[in-house]
Amino acid sequence: MKSWLDLNVFLGVPATQWLYAAIAAGISYLIISGVLRFVIARLRRLASRTSTHVDDVVVEVLERTHRFTIFVAALLIGSEFIDLPEKWDTRLSHLWFLVIGFQLALWVNHGVSLWTAGRLENATAAAHNPVITTMMSWTLRALLWSVLLLAVLANMGVNITAFVASLGVGGVAVALAVQSILSDLFASLAIGLDKPFEIGDFIVFNGVAGSIEHIGLKTTRIRSLNGEEIVCSNTELLKNTIHNYKRMAERRIVFGFGVTYDASPEQLRAIPGIVKAAVDSETHARFDRAHFKQFGESSLDFEVVYYVTDPAYNLYMDIQQRLNLKLMEHFSELGVGFAFPTRTLHVVGATDASAKGNVSKEAKPRVRAVQRDAFNRG
């Protein structure tokens, strides 16, 4: 059998060498696979006894070792038992570099995927902006595969200097063609770094009010108070002044009201104390001041300032409603009425007869109309 194998030649190589190469490739595949399974099993047991996630990531990365890579590596090991021409040895060394580089790139790529998924799953909507995580993931992947491609080309003897230069020129042309897209892309990067708002924040800008639902690489999606979804480009969004109400520690409330001019000074002096007592009776409210502000056109105007210690808008409206009802009750007991817009007409007659209702023909009455508008702020 051995003599037959020595006498028969396939592709210029004796059959004996082909047999040895096949046996070596098969044994190498089994050894590499077995060692890999043993290492993964040992690391998994160690990871189960630790609280860190790094070893868990290493185990998951090693489990993603591609079987085709192991198969090609086993074939390359078996090829060492074949007497190949010198040019084939050089090509096989290039192939070794490609296989190892490809597998390392797969490991790193899967590690980046695990890191990205962990960041996006573990972060809460109110405390994390996914823009930076997503952009870093894309950047790392692009850098990884670009470096691998350039390294493989350089290993094969390709002059990558001109290639890199041509990529730079092409990149400039592409950047000019997709200028608006890149503008939104960098705007999303600014949102991720500066964090003017995050998912879950309630913002108001340019007549739009709603909660942030999604921050993408090009657009931001906002759920408005009416229920519809508003999609706004990141560039246009950052051009506006944004009011972020989610980050309020407390609300400062300023409201006013007016009472009628028939109120006495004693009644006016009692009103600030009534307002203070009403505000102090609220658990989540802190009184600041209440003053008789001014003489209005048809009312005596008061201004009240207090703080709501919780930024929730519904809570503020509930407190304001209770304060309004309490003020109506106390003012009714005090005998003070709220002012409302009035218009008074003064008719001036030329003779005494006009005062009695008999206006002479010579009298030229004149009418002066004074319009008084009361502005009540609640």
Image (tube, rainbow, N blue to C red):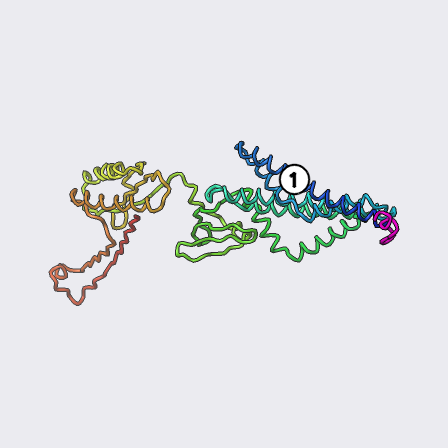
- SS at circle 1: helix
Farthest bottom residue in view: 361
Q: Position of residue 287 (x, y in %)?
A: 30, 36
Packing grade of label 1 (10 A; few <14, some 14-19, many >=20) is: some
Vertical comparison of 306 with 174: above or below: above
Q: Position of residue 362 (x, y in %)?
A: 18, 66
What residue is shown with label 1? 36
Residue 139 in view, yes or no? yes
Q: Position of residue 17 (x, y in %)?
A: 83, 47
User: Which is more toward the observer, 285 or 81?
Assistant: 81
Q: How many marks?
A: 1
User: Which is more toward the observer, 7 or 161?
Assistant: 7
Vertical comparison of 148 with 269: above or below: below
Farthest front residue in view: 1
Taking the image as shown, residue 192 lies to the left or right of residue 211, namely: right
- Residue occupying image coordinates x 58% and y 39%: 57
- Residue occupying image coordinates x 67% and y 56%: 176
Vertical comparison of 254 with 233: above or below: above
Q: Position of residue 119 (x, y in %)?
A: 53, 42
- Residue occupying image coordinates x 49% and y 42%: 123
Taking the image as shown, residue 225 lies to the left or right of residue 113, namely: left
Residue kind at label 1, given as amino acid type: Leu
In the image, residue 11 lies in the stretch drawn in magenta: yes
Residue 151 in view, yes or no? no
Boundaries of the magenta span: 1-13
In the image, residue 48 lies in the stretch drawn in magenta: no
Q: Residue 292, located in which quarter of the rendered image?
A: top left
Farthest left residue in view: 356
Taking the image as shown, residue 52 lies to the left or right of residue 292, namely: right
User: Which is more toward the observer, 96 or 201?
Assistant: 96
